[in-house]
Amino acid sequence: MSSTKEGQKISQVILQEGVYTFETWGSKKAVAEPVVYMIDHFVVGGFYRVHTTRGINENLNAPGMHFEPLAFINSCITPDQNMAPDADPNRFYAYGVIARLALLAAARELA
């Protein structure tokens, strides 16, 4: 990772933590992975990276992928105990927990 695809020297990078997923999207059950954005320790949004021709054990960041919005309807600070575990607010809460744990792991690695 010493240079970009265009041959330019790399001087700074953004670390991206990855968590294995079994998510699917749409009627064709395309493989999808949630991508969560954070500012400081706050989850602020995200999207699904979707690929219709890749499998669950393949990199979805490849030609043919597309993005679908990951709408954080509420702040998702706590799970909604009145809803099913896979209901959107609870799934988004789980994504946020995993994102915060990945952030802690990355901070620990830097220290």
Image (cartoon, helix red, strand yellow):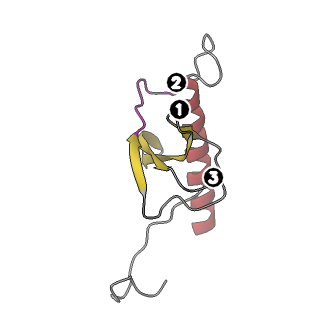
Mark 1, other Cα within 10 Å: few <14 / some 14–19 / many ≥20? many
Mark 2, other Cα within 10 Å: few <14 / some 14–19 / many ≥20? many
- Residue under the point 39% across and 47% down: 67
* Pointers 2 and 1 in contact (C-beta within 8 Å): yes
In the current view of this chain or complex, which residue is farthest to the top? 82
Magenta segment:
69-76
Q: Which residue is mark 1?
A: 92
Tell which of 58 and 11 is nearer to you: 58
Q: Is residue 45 magenta?
A: no
Name the disc covering residue 40, or none: none
Q: Which residue is mark 3?
A: 19
Q: Secondary structure at mark 2?
A: helix
Mark 3, other Cα within 10 Å: few <14 / some 14–19 / many ≥20? few
Q: Which residue is mark 2?
A: 89
Q: Secondary structure at mark 1?
A: helix
Spot occupied by residue 76 in the image (x, y as percentages of width and height) = 50, 27
Q: Amino acid at mark 3?
A: Val
* Pointers 1 and 3 in contact (C-beta within 8 Å): no
Query: Would you say 88 lies left or right of 38 here?
Result: right
